Image (spheres, helix red, strand yellow):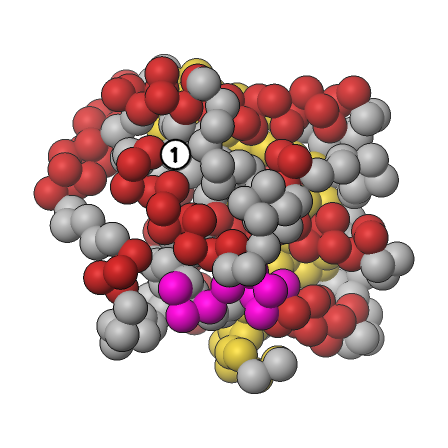
Amino acid sequence: MSLRMDLTARAVAVRARLSPFREVDQLRGRPYPEPAAVPKDLRRSHELTREEVGGRPVLRLTPRDGADGSHLIYLHGGAFVNPLLPAHWWIIREVVKGTGTTVTVPLYRLAPEGCADEGYDFLAAAWADLVARPAVDRIVVAGDSAGGCLAIGLAMLLRDTGLRAPDHVVGFSPALDVTASHPAVREIDPHDPMLSTDEVVPLCQAWAGDRSLTDPLVSPVHGDVEGLPPVHLVQGGRDILAADALGFARALQRAGNPGRLLYEPGAFHVYVGAWWTPEAQRAIRHVRSLL
């Protein structure tokens, strides 16, 4: 583990201890949270448009100079209950830096206001809208944490309905099993500087709605990985989600999936957001190469 990663993990741990925790019932009736503003540097390099698809907002960032037909759909994390944050924009900025990639950010309705059924209906509509556009040559669907679950779930849904698949899928520390039933989850918990199982899992479970917690669109680790496009997992070891990601990577490998696992034993949850660390930079370079 690099010194930068170690220092960043310490800072993350302090921030997590100071951040107030709210249970699902405390979120009901809240003012619906707004996404973070697009950073100025991304606004300088990309033209921002806001559209509606299926009754939900979709943000689109088109390079001001040299769009090349490659597209990144980014699905943000936040335990399904929190909005898009500045750190999500940092990940997007670093991944598309120096490329001609157009970015699509569907803002799915958060739990407990929203649920998996309407979420996937919206994501399917956003996907159909994008692939119907001219000169869409390559599409990478990526997401972090809860968004990583959605990225993989969307790929499963598209496969099962016989529709065009993404060229690649990327999960940054994806939430793959909201049951948290793997015994290693509790073993890792004391060493995770960001997440607490008892706090995060009920928030993620609120997303399921009427679906079973083991439904593959809620917990992709319980789904069939045959026939998926290349799935790339970027995972740190100091993360309660690590065991599920490693098991899912093994299942993908057994199925002959050509995606890669990028595993950093000393890194924390969605460490790619710490773009100033060498660990994050290695992962970003790989994902950028897919575009």
x then y, percent, for residue 206: 42, 55
Question: Is 42 rendered above or below residue 259?
Answer: below
In the image, taking residue 207 as reference, residue 96 lies left or right, namely right
In the image, taking residue 24 as reference, residue 41 lies left or right, namely right
Asked whether residue 172 appears in the rendered view, the answer is no
- Of residues 188 and 286, the one drawn nearer to the viewer in this rendering: 188
Membership of 40 in magenta stretch: no
Q: Residue at x 44, y 18 (%)?
A: 184
x then y, percent, for residue 213: 54, 45
Local SS, label 1 = loop
Query: What quarter of the picture does the N terminus occupy?
Result: top left
x then y, percent, for residue 108: 51, 67
- The residue labelled by disc 1 is 269
Q: Which region shows up in magenta?
A: 112-120
Question: Is 172 rendered above or below residue 87?
Answer: above
Q: Residue at x 38, y 41 (%)?
A: 201
- Of residues 111 and 136, the one drawn nearer to the viewer in this rendering: 111
Q: Please tell me how crowded label 1 is: few (under 14), some (14-19), or many (20+) other residues with Cα within 10 Å.
A: many
In the image, taking residue 30 as reference, residue 93 lies left or right, namely right
Query: Where, by quadrant of the figure, is residue 122 drawn?
Result: bottom right
Q: Residue at x 20, y 32 (%)?
A: 13
Circle 1: residue type:
His
- Of residues 186 and 57, the one drawn nearer to the viewer in this rendering: 186
